[in-house]
Image: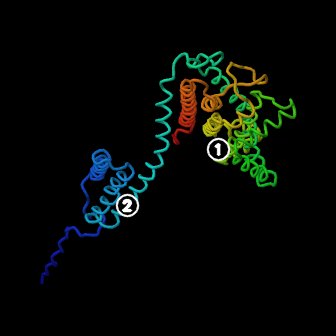
């Protein structure tokens, strides 16, 4: 007697609401359409109806920050709507944080760019009254003082980091050093300037002003930054590399020089470059220790020197008569200083890219 197999059940491919991959989706580009509508609403309220900018921005944000998630909730469900709402909030916070930066950049570029010329970079302020002159003396002062500070801070900070990572371990002395480095990281720049000024007053007498004193003040600010960044980079070097060198009978100092430092080179150079960028714009310590002059001075141990931050401050606070040329030079010096800092950050990025391991680029 033959039996027939029961028929196989048919597969039901009907979409079921609530399953993630079958949930209805908004058309692609809906978010961009909502953003464009928000811009139109803001522009219409502010330009067309003469409403203040802040209420207009809030109304425009409500279009995309409230309306878009509500539509998403109606079509896609609660989970997707919440994801879109959080994305909008995070993006809005980023945009708000960028407003001061963009405003500063725009203001400095707008006021400083018309001042830039060949004369501005090749002339000092010696015997200049009113229009004319430049920042040649301030550029050289900034370069020399910052280079002297780096020459003192980089070896000191790097050797301290090597001691903390390679020799210190968990002893009492490394803990004390780390605590002092953390304290130095948070000291105000004016305190570093007062320390350097007091140190040189003891050695040379009251009223001393020289570029080397400014370099010492910047060294106090720069050293803890170099120590912390170098320590972090050295700790990232795998211990297996050290152990392999020790297994071959390589001394510790040679392991550090030939294995540890080349491996961490990209991070070390990046940290040092960022430390230089951090101190190159300091004004208070240089105002106390170096002062300001209208002439070019290449001698760090003889008299006052001009630097870009102090030149900018002095041009704003003591503009002379008429004040417009001096204020314009201040904006130009601020723009040049900002460009120098941007170049240093770009150099740090390039060093990180080209000297880091290939799999980390």
Which residue appears farthest toward the bottom when viewing the image?
1
Answer with mark 1 or mark 2, whichever residue precedes in sequence.
2
Q: Quadrant of residue 194?
A: top right
The image quarter in which residue 2 lies: bottom left
**SS type, badge 2:** helix
Whether the residues at callouts 1 and 2 have beta carbons within 8 Å, the answer is: no
Q: Is residue 290 left or right of residue 275?
A: right
Name the residue at 30% across, 44% down: 47
The residue tagged 1 is 233
Residue 263: tell me if it is visible: no
Secondary element at tag 1: helix
Residue 246 appears at what percent x and percent y?
73, 44
Q: Which mark is residue 99?
A: none
**Residue located 62% across and 17% down the image:** 128
Q: Position of residue 95 (x, y in %)?
A: 43, 48
Residue 329 screen position, x and y as percent: 56, 25
Is any part of residue 98 visible from this angle?
yes
- The residue beneath circle 2 is 83
Q: Residue at x 33, y 67 (%)?
A: 78
Q: Is residue 342 left or right of residue 212?
A: left
């Amino acid at each position: 007697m033959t039996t027939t197999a029961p028929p196989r059940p048919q597969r039901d491919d009907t979409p079921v609401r609530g399953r993630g991959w079958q949930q209805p989706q908004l058309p692609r580009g809906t978010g961009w359409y909502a953003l464009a509508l928000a811009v139109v609403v803001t522009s219409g309220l502010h330009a067309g109806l003469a409403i203040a900018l802040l209420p207009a921005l809030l109304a425009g944000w409500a279009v995309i920050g409230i309306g878009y998630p509500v539509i998403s909730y109606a079509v896609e469900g609660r989970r997707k709507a919440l994801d879109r709402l959080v994305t909008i909030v995070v993006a809005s916070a980023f945009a708000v944080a960028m407003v001061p930066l963009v405003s500063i950049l725009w203001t400095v570029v707008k006021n400083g760019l018309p001042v830039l010329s060949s004369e501005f970079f090749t002339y000092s302020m010696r015997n200049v009254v009113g229009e004319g002159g430049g920042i040649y003396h301030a550029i050289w002062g900034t370069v020399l003082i910052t280079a002297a500070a780096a020459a003192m801070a980089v070896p000191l900070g790097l050797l301290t980091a090597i001691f903390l990572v390679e020799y210190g371990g968990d002893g009492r002395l490394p803990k004390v050093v780390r605590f002092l480095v953390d304290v130095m990281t948070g000291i105000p720049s004016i305190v570093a300037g007062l320390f350097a000024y007091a140190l040189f007053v003891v050695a040379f007498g009251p009223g001393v002003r020289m570029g080397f004193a400014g370099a010492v003040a910047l060294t106090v600010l720069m050293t803890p930054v170099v120590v912390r960044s170098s320590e972090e980079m050295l700790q990232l070097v795998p211990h297996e590399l050290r152990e392999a060198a020790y297994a071959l009978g390589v001394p510790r100092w040679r392991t550090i020089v030939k294995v540890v430092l080349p491996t961490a080179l990209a991070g070390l150079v990046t940290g040092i470059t960022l430390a230089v960028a951090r101190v190159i714009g300091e004004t208070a310590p240089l105002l106390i220790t170096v002062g300001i002059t209208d002439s070019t001075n290449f001698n760090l141990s003889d008299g006052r020197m001009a630097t870009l931050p102090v030149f900018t401050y002095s041009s704003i606070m003591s503009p002379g008569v008429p004040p417009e040329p001096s204020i314009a030079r201040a904006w130009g010096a601020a723009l040049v200083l900002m460009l120098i800092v941007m170049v240093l950050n770009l150099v740090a990025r390039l060093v990180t890219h080209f000297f880091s391991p290939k799999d980390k680029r």
